Amino acid sequence: MSSGETVKVGMLGMGTVGGGVAAILQRNGSLLARKTGIKLELQRVLVRDPSRRRAVDLPPQIYTTDPEMVVKDPSIDVVVELMGGIEPARTLISAALKENKFVVTANKDLMARHGQELLQLAYCYGEDIFFEASVGGGIPLIRPLKHCLVANRIERMVGIINGTTNYILTRMSLDDMDFQEALSKAQELGFAEADPSNDLEGRDAAYKLTILAGLAFDCSLNPDDLFTQGISGVTRADIHYARELGYTIKLLAVAEQMPTGLALGVHPALVPLTHPLATVYDEFNAIFIKGDLIGETMFYGRGAGALPTASAVVADIIDAAYSLQSGVKDRPSPGKSNNRKITLLPLSALSSRFYVRLQARDLPGVFGAVATAFGEEEVSLDMIIQKRKTNGMAEIVLVTHDVNEERFYRSLKRVARLPAIEPEPGVFRVLG
Ligand code: NAP
Ligand code: HSE
């Protein structure tokens, strides 16, 4: 530590989250010092454009466009990476570790793709990387998995771990807001990634699930191996039909330990209105974690946004400072268990109920033919409705009972072959 109990912080990036960190240090700096005995001092901040107006006023000389002024400055104790993306973040974090600095990051893309390599590097240099803010914004999830639940064999995790898509789906559902308008609002509020397609196509949630599942099931995962489906296929009609049937639509991340391996993925799903996840609105996230000892636990809170996310970042900086003080690191050596390779199962390993929206020509017997085609593959239907549309078309919407995925798709193929049925049905899983 630089002098007394002052910890000098160098920040890479000062956008939504970086601005939140600076705001917290201004607003709650003395509270933090009283509670922890540690004074955090922002020493240097890397940005692309130092002339840009920021949410928080800092002395102009604090800004730099030269990353070495942060990662190589010997007076800086902790480097906080809040730029996002893989490069140059990966190179700069590596450089900071090699300069014997602790690192804090909120970067899920990087931790999901290169977490093991960076943690290994940190270990080699006697340093550590803290990444609580990478999943669930301000919700404590990484620490509970690493510490509080460590005695448990984790059996299942299911939840909402992307704030932007949850915000969009909430506004579309509760205010009938148009998709584009809801996305613009989420961007304005600072929830969305620099490339919002990461949120919309489920990649952001897949990165987060990779990190969580890696810790929960002590294994090493590649986000590219996860089944990932975003919300771009969810229409306003699906949201309305879902509500009529007693459901809402959410983007879910699911991981389940099966006897033969781990099934995991990200996909939109119909959630019963009576399920606690149905009332997780806006940028809030919630995740159920089931352990063999504790049973079910639920973590809930703001999963995105400047102050909630920065709250987790600042807590990590304090943890890094405690480690600096005590010389004790936060985690066991890597390579003991979290490099464990496991068998990944496709989501089809889990049987599910399915929602289907079909476009059909409004002819006599079509409704019956659809039900029969499903029945012939022994797919049992729980609910089925038909809505007349314009131009002689109708929409048939149904929910199946629990069915093996292979059988379900076989029956859907049979339905698709019916002459009155248009291609490309809307299909989503239904949370049981
Ligand atoms: P952001 O608003 O886009 O801010 C990024 C910051 O990094 C900006 O200050 C930018 O500088 C700087 N930057 C980016 N590339 C740079 C480069 N090559 N050289 C120098 N500076 C560079 O991003 P954010 O929303 O704060 O997100 C930061 C990280 O937190 C990401 O990993 C994100 O996934 C994660 N995260 C975000 C949230 C959230 O709610 N936003 C929540 C949890 C985690 P300029 O300002 O000069 O352009
Ligand atoms: N874009 C992310 C989200 C930010 O919407 O959840 C929080 O990780």
Image (cartoon, rainbow, N blue to C red):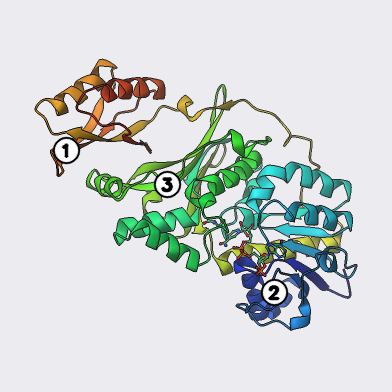
- Rendered-image quadrant of the N terminus: bottom right
Where 251 falls versus 61 (above or below)? Answer: above
Q: Amino acid at mark 1?
A: Met
- Identified at 20% across, 20% down, the residue is 372
Q: Is 388 or 256 nearer to us in this picture?
A: 388
Cα–Cα gap, marks 2 and 3: 40 Å
Disc 2 CB within 8 Å of nearest ligand 1 atom? no
Q: Is 277 or 60 nearer to us in this picture?
A: 60
Q: Earlier in the sequence, mark 2 or mark 3?
A: 2
The numbered mark at residue 109 is none
Say whether marks 1 and 3 touch (CB < 8 Å): no
Q: Amino acid at mark 2?
A: Leu
Closer to us: mark 1 or mark 3?
A: 1
Query: Pointer 3: what residue?
Result: 231
Query: Pointer 1: what residue?
Result: 393
How packed mark 1 is, by other alpha carbons closer than 10 Å (few <14, some 14-19, many 20 or more), is some
Closer to us: mark 2 or mark 3?
A: 3
Query: Pointer 2: what residue?
Result: 32
- Indicate the quadrant where residue 427 lies: top left
Q: Is 230 or 351 nearer to us in this picture?
A: 230
Q: Position of residue 117 (x, y in %)?
A: 78, 42
How packed mark 3 is, by other alpha carbons closer than 10 Å (few <14, some 14-19, many 20 or more), is many
Q: Amino acid at mark 3?
A: Ile
How packed mark 2 is, by other alpha carbons closer than 10 Å (few <14, some 14-19, many 20 or more), is some
- Indicate the quadrant where residue 61 lies: bottom right
Q: Position of residue 417 (x, y in %)?
A: 27, 21
> Is residue 274 visible from the viewing direction of this image?
no
Where 118 falls versus 413 (above or below)? Answer: below
